[in-house]
Every structure is written in structure tokens, then in C-alpha cells.
Image (spheres, grey):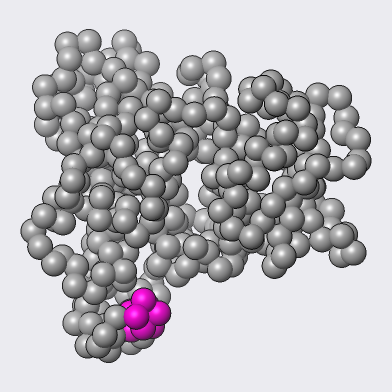
Amino acid sequence: MYTAVHTILCENPLQKMWDSFLYFESEPTTKQFLQKAYESYGFEKPNFYAFQNTAKFIYTIRQARQYYTAAAGSDILIRPLLLYYGMVSLLKAYLLMCDPEYPSNTKVLQHGLTSRKVKKLYYSFTEDEVKVQKDGLLPHVHTFLNKDKLQEKYRMQELLAMVPELRPAYRRLYGHSPLLSVSLSRYRDFEQPFTMFYLPESVLDDVHLTYDAFVYYLNRYNEGKAYFSGSQVKAPPGIIRLEWHHPDSQHVTENGNGFENKLFLMDYKGDFFYRTGKTENGSENLPEIINHYMVMYILGMLCRYETEKWGEIVFSFSSEDIYIIHEFLAVSSRKFPNLVYDLLLGERHVFWSK
């Protein structure tokens, strides 16, 4: 999906990321960008569609910027709703790039999700579920991102567990996390170009496999040209050493698609995580951008339609949900626009400061 990865060192990563969106707020560059995208997808009349959608695309990006700017300065009582509509605007821009006739009908203008309208008396956000509808924004976006079929419903706690940046908060709240930090060797041997990396030895117990069988297990989840092999170098006690090979990339940090494997995730700093186990509803197979959208949808609906319940979560001392909600809002407001920016350009961008 991604042809390259770029690490942009800057003093203010968030500001630099949004400044990068200015490329899409110029009519000449946006028209050229859309025409090139439509040509690559094989659409007829790419120049016509680019001319027709340029202004719409620009205003959609600008609207998203305003939503996120307003959210940054707002109280948490309304912040999720602003962030959700910022997400919607960014996803509409992505759809305009993939589908020049979007919206072709009114069905795709729906949210694509629904939730329980009347919340339980003893409500728990992390136990709440979101249900996927047949039509709407989310299923339409998903068709361009993933061939896997969407499940009927997803639980918030399982969605939150798959956000790499939430791993410390998730472990603190629930005592464990399905994501393990991957330690990469920065050493490069030009005669044997591969990435050596390390995992806790406990991963073998999790899947009930030997070291060699685990290597085979990892390769079952490959999605590109990359593959794993065992290392001949003995690892220190408590960890296992593995090798990642790719015909076009010497080091995994230089590959736009990372490990090219469903079991590995990447955070916005460019660090990698290995996913252990499976969830009940397959949320581990969701593109992360869909994951964020689902969680923010529930939060947005809470603060819009369940004002009293939302107020109790935010302002009372009795809810354990507020901690993970605060963390998610902070992470998503930083990462979601970054994910969309990467999708638009077909390249990963790591905005980071040392």
C-alpha cells in the first residue's frame, strides 16, 4: 500500500503534520494530484473529474483542519464530537481521491455505524458495542482499505487494545496488553541485508509453539514480499532473536509497509509492536483508521445524545473509563490525520522530534 516511509524531524510534529496538508489547499497542486490519482486508478475522463472535484476536495480538507483546531481548544464535554466530524471530513477527502463520483447516492452519506440508543443504567464505555451497517461512510471507506469482511459488531475495549499508542494506559488499566514492544537492531550488514529483531520468549508460550514453528507461524501472516527466518546467533535468556528479510528493503524502518505482516503494528513514532492472541470479533484485522473511527463514533454519540451519561463519565470520580478516553482522544487527534495523510500520498510519514 505504501511505497516509502519518510521521517520528518521537527520541533512541533503536530503543527508540521497539519502544515503538510497545505499542499492540498492549493487549486493547481490539488487538481494535478487528483488527476494523477484518477489516471492511476484507470478512470475515464480523469481531467474532467479532477476539475470537478478540486474545490470540493480543498474545502473538505480545510473543514477538517477547522474541526481539529476547534477540538484542541474545546472542553472534553464536546471534544469527541468535533474530532468525529473532523474524521468524517478527512475520510470524505480520501473517498474523493478513490471515487471521483462520490457521493454517488445518499446511502453513502450515512455514518455506516449504529449503537444502542438507550444506554444501560450502569453503563461502561469499554463494554459498549458499535454495529456496522450495510451502507454508509465506514463500509464505503473500508472497501478501499481492506478485503476482509467487516463483522457485525465490535466492542470498544477490543478496539482500544489494538491502538499501539494506548499500550501503556491499557496495561495500567487492565493489567495486560495484547501488544508487545518489538526491539529492533539498528545494525546494518550490507553483505547480509536483513533486520534483526527481538521478542520476549513468552510469545512461544502464548501460541504453544517451538522457536522454529513460531517462525513458520509468523510467515503465515505475511502480506507482501517480506519473510521471517530464525537467527543462528544465540539470544540472551528470556528473549528470542529473529530475522526479517525483504528483497527491496534492507531495514524494516525503511519499508513503507513495515513488517508487511498482520501481526505487527506501528505507532506514529515509527516504533513496532507485535500482536498476541485474537479478539472475539476480529477487531485485530481492522485497518487502524477504521478502528479510530468506530471508537470516536461512540464517543461522539455519547456527548451528543447521552449528555447526562457523558457528563457522569467526564466529571464524576466513579467512572474508570475517563482515563482511557482521555488517552484515546489525545492519541487519535494526533494520529488519525497522519493516517489519512499517508493514505492520500501512498507513503508513510513519521513526524517526530528528538
Picture coordinates of residue 238, whole percent (x, y): 81, 24
Picture coordinates of residue 209, whole percent (x, y): 70, 26
For residue 120, above or below residue 50? above
Location of residue 152 (image quadrant)? top left
For residue 323, above or below residue 131? above
Q: Can residue 117 be seen in this view?
A: yes
Label the magenta part by its dominant secondary structure: helix
253 within the magenta span: no
Task: Name the side, left or right, on which 174 lies relative to 43.
Answer: right
Q: What residue lies at 45% left-to-right and 70% top-to-bottom?
A: 345
* Residue extending farthest left: 106
Task: Name the side, left or right, on which 107 lies relative to 198.
Answer: left
Q: What residue lies at 58% left-to-right and 30% top-to-bottom?
A: 276
Picture coordinates of residue 328, whole percent (x, y): 40, 35
For residue 259, above or below residue 18? above
Picture coordinates of residue 156, whole percent (x, y): 34, 28
Task: Name the side, left or right, on which 202 lies relative to 92.
Answer: right
Location of residue 60 (image quadrant)? bottom left
Instruction: Find the magenta span and give its range.
Output: 34-42
